[in-house]
Amino acid sequence: MLNNFLSENFRLKSDQIFEGLTSTEQEILAASGVTHLYKKGEIIFRESGIPTGIFYIKSGRVKKYKSTVKGGEQIFYVCSEGELLGYHALLGEDYYPDSAATIEDSEITFIPKESFLQVLRNSTVLSNRLLKALGHEFSLFINSITNLATKTVRERLAFNLLVLEEKFKKPGCKSSTPVEIKMSRTDLANMVGTAKETLVRLLQEFKSNQLVETTRKTIRIINRKGLITEANMIGHNLKK
């Protein structure tokens, strides 16, 4: 199934990391955590910054991106509810390799480094899950790079729309429930790796071919099978 393929290959598996922790471990994280409401477009951390903790997304969505030599952005991932940010740099005792900013109003909890590492040192469950998450993160970035290098702009747009449809689904919603992708054309162009003008033209073609419906702020997939064909993913035996 398409949903399983996208979930397994293009999602950072950090949304269940805290499940199974003891009540004491959960209390340590909860007591030290501070929750903030971030407005759309706010920076959470910047590339080359020093990590002082991790961020847990309670609600909302966040883009992870690298700055380009021309001052633009290359968005390589969109995080959603239940996912962690910043743990890679923290564990590696390194600077942030990327930046993170909200693409919609978001509620995010910051957990200080000391509390997180205290639990990590004493929890086999957490350490094992983080190791798996780090391994999957590496695979995710390889898949993203391969996608950018081998697919045409048209294929990348179709593919990223399918990925984003999964990211914008509300928890517990049925697969048949329409999903509105709420992402600016500029951000979507930066994710696809193309100019905004090219993106707008391709979206109009997809709309004319009755693959998607669009408004000024939203995109909705109405023909997933057709979009799978546009993304050149037929070889994965994906179902509608």
Image: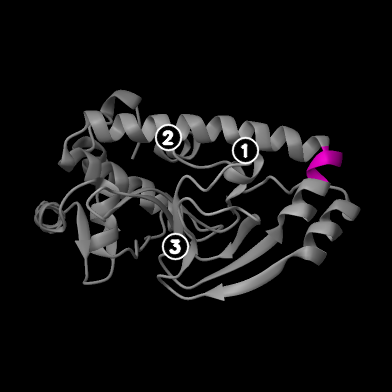
* Label 1 to label 3: alpha-carbon separation: 21 Å
User: Which quadrant: the N terminus?
Assistant: top left
Q: Secondary structure at mark 2?
A: helix
What amino acid type is highlighted by mark number 3? Ala
Regarding residue 93, the answer to whether it shows in the image is: yes
The residue at which mark 3 appears reads as 101
Q: Is residue 187 left or right of residue 207?
A: right
Residue furthest top as drawn? 235
Residue pictured at 52% horizontal, 48% vertical: 96
Residue 228 in the image: state x and y as whole percent.
26, 38
User: Which amino acid is tagged 1?
Assistant: Gly
In percent of width and height, residue 171 lies at 55, 58
Alpha carbon separation for disc pair 1 and 2: 17 Å
**Figure check: 139 above or below 203:** above
Residue 141 bears which disc, if any?
A: 2
Sequence-first tag of 2 and 3: 3
Task: Write down the quadrant of residue 122 in the picture.
Answer: top right
Q: Which residue is mark 1?
A: 92
Residue 100 is a magenta residue = no
User: Between residues 20 and 197, which one lies in front from this camera angle?
Assistant: 197
Cβ–Cβ below 8 Å for labels 1 and 3?
no
Magenta region, residue range: 119-123
When asked about the image quadrant of residue 218, the answer is: bottom left
